[in-house]
Amino acid sequence: MTTVGHEDLGAALAEDEFVIPTYNDIGADVPEEIASQRCTYLCGNSLGPLAKRSQFLIQEELCVWATRAVEGHFDHPHGREWMTIADTVTPLLADLVGAKDKEVACMGTLTANLHLMMSAFYKPTPNRYKILCEGKAFPSDQYAFASQALFHGYDPKDAIVELGPREGEFTLRSSDVLDVIVKQGSSIALVIFSGVQYYTGQWFPMKEITEAAKEQGCICGWDLAHAIGNVPLSLHDWDVDFAVWCSYKYLNSGPGGIGGLFVHERWESNRTPQFAGWWGHDPTTRFLMPPDFSPIPGAQGFQQSNPSVLTTVSLLGSLQVFKRVGMMKPLRERSVSLTAHLEVLLRQTGFYVSSHEAAKYSPDDPPRFTIITPVERESRGAQLSLLFLPTESNVMERVLNHLKSAGVIGDERKPDVIRLTPAPLYNTKRDCERAAEVLKRAFEAISKST
C-alpha cells in the first residue's frame, strides 16, 4: 500500500510506476526548460501508459523464453509457470469487477469474448428475440450484435432495439431505459449495454438495469471496456449474467492487450461452453489429451487457447500497481475529485456553453464547446467528452491541433468531440490545469482568426 497523500498519489505513481512520454517524445512545441518533462497525458480511456512493472515482467519472460524455452510451461524460475499464468491475474481482475475468482477468465480479446458470450446466452425464440442496447454503441459491439441476429435468422433492423437520447439531449435517461425494458421485456432476449459509454462517458446505472432486465426474464450482459479499472463494479452481487472487457484502457496492459470475461456462478451447472478449446479443459488431465471435453467449472471453462504470456504479465504489472494503492476505493475517490476539478476549470475558460445552449447552437454562432458527459458523479467515471460548436465545422480539429502542439494528449471522435480523461492512477490536478490552460489559448487563437 502506498503511503503518499491523496493529492500526491497521481504524481508519485506517474513518476515511480509509469513511463509517460515526455514533451520531446511527442514533438510538442514547448519551452526547452520543460521539454524533458512528462507530457499532459489525458488519453487513458483509449490507451493507458506503460507500467514500469509491466516492462520489467515482460523482460523477465523474454529471458525465461530464451533460457528455458518450452520448459517454462512447468518450470519457471520466478514461479510464474506458463501453464497457469492466467492465475496470476484472475484474483486481481475478480476484485476489480466484484466477482468470485471462478466467475472470471483472463482470455482472448473483447469482441471475440463478446461473440463467445452471445453464442452461449443469446437464445432467441419467435416471441423473445430482441437485443436491447444503447444507440451508437462502440462499432465493434454493433457489428457483433447485428451478425449474431443474422446468424439466428433475424433482421437486425427488427431484432436490435437501440435507445438514443431525447431530442436536444446528449445522454440516455435512466428512466427511459427502464421504461423500455418494462414495456418490451417479453420480446427482449438480451439486454446489453456498455458499463461506461465510450463516446459520452456516461456510466449507466448497471445495478438498476440488470434488476429490471432480470425481472422481465431477459439475459443481461455488459461491455466493460471503459468501465473496468475506471468505476467500482459488483457484478456478482448485481446478478449480472455475463460481462466482457479489454485491458488496454484503464488497465494499462498495452495495445491489443489480453481481454477477459465474467460469467455468474449461477450458470456453472446449467451451461456447458458451446465452443470448446483445450485450455477450457480440466487442467489436471489437459495434457493427457483425452478425447472428450471436460470443462473447468465456471467462466474459465470458456477458455479455448493458452493465453499469451507476454500480454498476461504486461497486465499483471499494471494490476500490481492497482493492488499497491488499494484497488478501486481510493482510486474512485481521486477520480471523482480530479474529474470535477477538470470540469470546473473547463467551465471557467470563458468558451464553455451549457448543454441547453448547445442544443440551440447555429452555424453562425462563435466557436464554443459544451460537455456532454453527465455532471452527476454517479453517472460518470474519469472522462469528460467535449462537443465543439458549431457542429460540422472544423473547430474540433483546430483545438485538437493546439492541444497536441502543446503536449496535451486527448483523443478525437470525429466530427466534433474530444475526450479528456484524468485517470486517477497517474494523472494530477496540474494535468487538468494545463489542459484547461491550453484549451483556453486554443479558443483565443481561433477567435482572433475568425
Image (cartoon, rainbow, N blue to C red):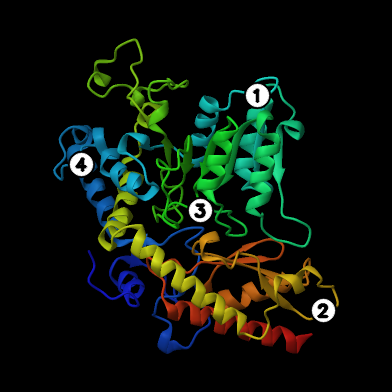
Q: In which quarter of the image is the C terminus?
A: bottom right
Q: Position of residue 101 (x, y in %)?
A: 31, 38
Q: Is mark 4 on a helix, strand or loop?
A: loop
Which mark is first along the chain, 3 or 2?
3
The amino acid type found where label 1 is placed reads: Phe
The answer to whether marks 1 and 2 mark residues whose Cβ atoms lie closer than 8 Å is no
Q: Distance between the residues labelled 4 and 1?
A: 40 Å
Q: Distance between the residues labelled 3 and 1?
A: 27 Å
268, 398: nearer the viewer: 268
**Tag 1 residue:** 151
124, 92: nearer the viewer: 124
Residue 218, above or below 337: above
Q: Where is residue 138 in the image (x, y as percent from the top left)?
A: 61, 48
Which mark is first along the chain, 4 or 2?
4
The answer to whether marks 2 and 4 mark residues whose Cβ atoms lie closer than 8 Å is no
Which mark is first along the chain, 2 or 1?
1
Describe residue 153's horizontal placement relative to residue 428 as left or right: right
**Tag 2 residue:** 365
**Tag 4 residue:** 80
Would you call the spot at circle 2 few (<14 residues within 10 Å), some (14-19), or many (20 or more)? few
